[in-house]
Amino acid sequence: MDHEQRSALIEQYIDGYRVVVAALEGADLDAREAPGEWSPRAVVHHLADSEMTSAIRLRRVLVEDRPLVQGYDQDAFAAILFYDRPIEASLAAFKAARDSCAEILTRLNDEQWRREGEHSDSGTYRLSDWLEIYGVHAHEHADQIRRSQQIR
């Protein structure tokens, strides 16, 4: 990934919280795009869980020598962690994780961008892989929230 691509993904990452909040404006938090799909409420809780996990992954890859980056079962999180609860705390967690990671991302040098870990599910896990996943993650879920509102 070149510097220009990386910069664009960082900007997209930074904008992720705003995009999700905009998609939530006036949304029915319990609407679903289709049976079995997550509601906007569940998406917010997923984003909080995912962002807190990704924040630790970023830090471990930067600080530790080739750490094991453990995968997790997002569906088990949704089933067990009460994704029907209010969203305010999860929105705050999502924002805080994003903001703290953004401060780190904008300061990394080329050597730090080359650091790697080993993902339990997918093998070599580079910081550029991390950015490619999380740079678009919130935007993809904002789209999911908007689609859930089209079925009303």
Image (cartoon, rainbow, N blue to C red):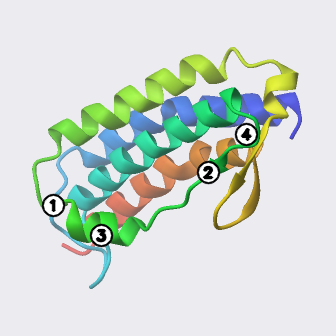
Badge 2 vs badge 4, beta-carbon distance below 8 Å? no
Q: Earlier in the sequence, mark 4 or mark 1?
A: 1
Residue 107 is left or right of residue 48, and the answer is: right
Badge 2 local density, few (<14 within 10 Å), some, or many (20+)?
many
Q: Helix, strand or loop at disc 1? A: loop
Q: Helix, strand or loop at disc 4? A: helix
Q: Helix, strand or loop at disc 3? A: loop
Amino acid type, residue under disc 2 in the picture? Val
Query: Which residue is at the front of the view, 150 or 64?
Result: 64
Q: Position of residue 109 (x, y in %)?
A: 81, 18
Whole-number angstrom distance, CA of label 3 to CA of label 1 = 13 Å
Taking the spot 86% from the left edge, 23% from the top edge, the residue there is 110
* Quadrant, the N terminus: top right
Badge 4 local density, few (<14 within 10 Å), some, or many (20+)?
some
Amino acid type, residue under disc 4 in the picture? Leu
Q: Which mark is residue 127?
A: 4
Whole-number angstrom distance, CA of label 4 to CA of label 1 = 31 Å
Q: Earlier in the sequence, mark 2 or mark 4?
A: 2
Q: Helix, strand or loop at disc 2? A: strand
Q: Which mark is residue 38?
A: 3
Taking the spot 40% from the left edge, 35% from the top edge, the residue there is 17
The residue that mark 1 highlights is 82
Q: Earlier in the sequence, mark 2 or mark 1?
A: 2
Taking the spot 89% from the left edge, 35% from the top edge, the residue there is 2
The residue that mark 2 highlights is 69
134 vs 33: above or below? above
* Residue occupying the far bottom of the picture: 35
Q: Position of residue 149 (x, y in %)?
A: 25, 64
